[in-house]
Amino acid sequence: MSVHPYNPKNVAGKLAKVFINNPLTLVLGVFILVIGYISLVSMPRQENPQMVVSGSNIIVALPGASAKEVERVIVKPLERKIKEVKGVEYIYGRALKNVGIVTASFYIGQPQEISNLKIYNEIMQNMDILPKGAMYPIIKPLNINTVIPIVTIAFFNKNKHHSQTYLYDKVTHFQNIINALPNVAVTHIKGGHKHQFNIKVNLHKLSAYNISLGQIVKSVQSLAYDVPKIKNQTKNKKIVIFGIKNAVDSIKDIQNIIVAKYGGSPIYLKQIASVSNGYNYQNFRSAQISIRGKNGKFDPLKNQVTLTVSKLKGTNAVIIANQIKKTLSRYKTMLNKEGISYLITRNYGKRANSAVNELVKHLIISIIIIAVLLIFILGWRESLIVTFTVPAIFSITLFVAYLTHQSMNRITLFAFLLSLGLLVDAAIIVIENIHRHFHSIDLHHHSEVDLMIEAADEIGAPTNIATFAIILTMIPMLFVGHMMGQFMAPIPENVPIALIASLFVAYIFIPYLALRILKKPKHKQEHK
Amino acid sequence: MFKKFEHAIRAGIVNAKTRWLILAFTLIAFIASVAMIPTGLVRVKMLPEKDSNTFNIYIKLPAGSSIYQTKRVSTCVYNVAKQNKYVQNIELYSGMGSPLDFAGLIKGSQFQNSENYAQLVINLTNKHKRDTPSFTIVHNMRPLVHGKCDNIIKNTNIAFVQPPSGPPVLDSVVAEIYGNNAKGIRHLASSVKNIFRHTKGLVDISTMEQKIYKQYGIKINTDKAQLSGISVKQINNILYLAFKGKIVAVKNSNKYNYQIPLFMVLSNQTKPFNNQSLHAVTSKLSSLSLMNSKGMMVPLISLITIKPVDSDPMILSKNLKQMTNVMASTDMVSQIYPLMKARDKILKQLSGRYHITKTGLFNLRLVSKQTGKIYNLKWGGEMKVTLQTFEQLGTAFIAALILIFLLMVVYYKSYKLSSIVLLGSFLSFPGVVFGHFVMNLFTTDTFFLTATSLIGFIALIGISSRNSLLLIDFTRSLMKEKAMKKADAIAFATVTRAKPIFLTAVAIILASTLLASDPVFGGLGVALIFGTIAAVIASLMVVPILLYMIDLKTLFNCHYKKVVSIEDPDFD
């Protein structure tokens, strides 16, 4: 045993020295693995990285104006005003007949709330530039989270007897249930028809009775009117409430509206128009679905109602999608009884989960392959040590990513796969040097602890510098702009963290584990 | 075995002939690999296509088409799509876009709210359970759909929209045509569209232009209207009410989640015109009359004149400049090559009508020979994103090199050594490019050099510089502390460092093999595998030679204070 304990010169040796005989090292190791696992499970999962796309659509209607007029009096003045807003990258103008739409799209990465506010402010301050007769501008911010649904469900009738509105009414009830689930932002219904009383006027009869359409409108409007109940007090201060019953209550009431008098006798609405309790057939939009049956043949296209669900920002799509799925299956028998089937036609939660799980699987397989390789080259003890460092490094990286509100997505895992080859490096270099020192006849008289520290210390400086060099190559990627920059951002965000973590793990845990797992070859001592 | 290796390296670096031979070979390999990109031996694409479980088909009929015409086309597309054995279910949204996705958001699917639009959502079997990737399914389905459904209604656009593997773009090839006169823009756009149509590799071609179609304009005779006590608003209202219908009142309901509207319109039997002629329109309108303020009936037809006019197409602008887009998708190819082909065609075919000058990198400026009006053609969409990304990644790469160089200068305090590290780090490039070339030979689809390959290459710079660094560091300590001779020290250091270099290289290669089969990250995998091989060769052969060629002794401050040279234990 040497008399003077080895004095480390480098941060590598110093770290090794502090932790090599410290009982807390083990606790630290376990702690790192646990927080890593917690981060892995609780990080919001997505298929692709979250992209901040800020922008707003400003829609101004000017009834009766041609596209050219709309361009001159609405689109161009609005565009000029939006040009004043800082951070706007593109301004798109669309002048159509009767309506002008201006889209302001911000540079990628501009904060959403502030950008939305900027546009709102700018338009509100400049309301006076809008021409007379223009309708109030509608400002619709493009919120990528709430605009893009993560789950869509198609509901359809199993039997054909149900009315056109049946499905819609049932789904609107269901919409409330889904909307009440935590972290669900917006639910929206596509397709389906609403209830409506249809008054279809016969043109021939109109001219025969010499009635104008305006008259019919007036008489219908005069009857279909709702007022709140009226409250009055009696002489001895008791309350009496009375109200006018809505004159239009059923289809009959509408049919019996008197439209005009013709030669002394009243003309009822039913005489000149067909009145029906139907659906809003003027809505030309429709949604249909066709599913491949068990026999491999497609069912014919049938009407459906799609319920779309989007989530709040930063929440976990996987959890929300599962909740929705569970809720649906809970109501399955009820829906079945009502003759309604459903099919989940989009599930981003599932997509994100399978993308993430697939890459995690790849990652684990790769780690195993490397471990097996190391067994052949370094021996199984060394291989075991290096293999431990990989989950530890990823745990630290994941935890940092979790703290910085990143999501778990394809690119994050891609960064991990990319760094896998790089980060076993520090571990391999340290273990290889320990191995070399262990087997060196020159150094056999040193204590095991000293050998470890010395081995770590020796390669510390070049390894640090080399790792730093790799980090430097990654950093400039942070400055790639536009959507592609945001898309790739998890790489420069995570690889440097993983590399720094790899250094610490290599210096702290490898000597610690090596001391306990590796055996110093005895024959060399005997040889001396 | 290590001994042999060491001697071989020592012999290699000492012999001037082999030195120059190796260096010359390296230089040739480097130049050859760079040359493979412009010659098209290795093809470049921003991001490859990815296999997904769903895709959309956008159908756009010419403006003014009815929902029934749209349904005829969409049913045709549906019938073709359901023939494919991988299709599980199909959703058809008529008169509106399908539930929005990221690609749809960029493509403006949320604005497709009129009778001439329809979208189909095609859901496929899970990708793990099928052997054909979704892009191949689209590739096979596309010609069938176009062949059967394009000509049901003339000028129908049918486009296949797949979930993008990266950030979405408007389309693969987008020609933005700027100008200040609508007619000229329209004319040029249709010429460009025609050229796109005849360019191989471009599919699903469309313009943002709305087709001009016949309409009837109603002019109100204001004198007559005023004299008969009818306001213009009244006339507008009655026409709208009669033919489009209007909600005239609502009824509150405790049964439904909304108020029930009372909707009024002419009946289905009496509403339709007999045909599209002016006569039919006039005769229908003549049966409508209005009541004036005095309660007298005034026939509508007496107050108006009807004239056929052209429709009023949408006017588009971008950044305050009037423009239109001509768009095309690519079919299993990178957009760069068909775009360049189309550009050449524009230069050739339109030179009769326009004076064409090149602006920027690929953009064009066209001046009409007839009118002297100026038009600008700029490439947007994927081309713009590709150029931006490669430009920025290129800048990032150069910045990385400079940073590494500075770091080395700080560490070694020598420009020469730092230059060697830098040179060494470049040498993975031939590996990356040759790797892609080899992969392309073995895969059925084109194997593209993508942005992910570039990221792999940037990571390789770090790996190579680390290898060189460890080598130099060890040589330095051997020369300084053990006073070894230059050639011996370099050879010994190379052999000693070879083991960890090999180890990490094999680790990287093995970790990347799974990546290489991924359609999106394949480029990165291949770049890492072949780049690492090249980097190892560079570190073990080229860097030692370069090291030998500079004066290490003075650089490392070796003063040979110790007279006795200490032989390494392995040397005896």
Image: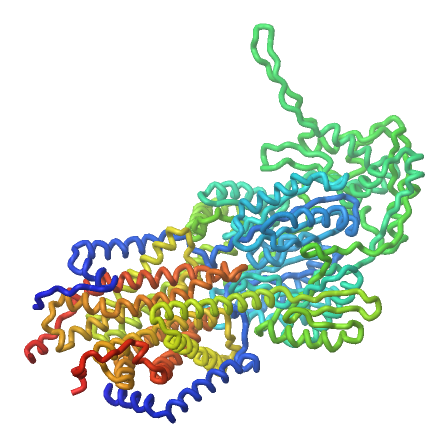
Where residue A457 sits in the image (x, y, percent)? 22, 67
Residue, x 61% and y 42% (percent of image)? A120
- Which is nearer the eye, B426 or B274? B426
* The N terminus of chain A, quarter of image: bottom left
Figure quadrant of residue B44: bottom right
- Which is nearer the eye, B521 or B400? B400
Camera sees residue A276: no
Camera sees residue A507: yes
Figure quadrant of residue B356: bottom right
Residue, x 85% and y 36% (percent of image)? A212
Residue at the far top in the pictured view = A236
Residue, x 80% and y 75% (percent of image)? B352
Q: How many marks?
A: 0
Where residue A216 sits in the image (x, y, percent)? 80, 34
Where residue A418 sits in the image (x, y, percent)? 39, 67
Colour option used: rainbow
Where residue A333 sits in the image (x, y, percent)? 46, 47
* The C terminus of chain A, quarter of image: bottom left
Residue B38 falls left or right of residue B70? left
Residue A484 falls left or right of residue A516? right
Residue, x 34% and y 84% (percent of image)? B548
Q: In this picture, is B109 found above or below B31? A: above
- Which is nearer the eye, B487 or A96? B487
Q: In this picture, is B101 found above or below A207? A: below
- Which is nearer the eye, B248 or A267? B248
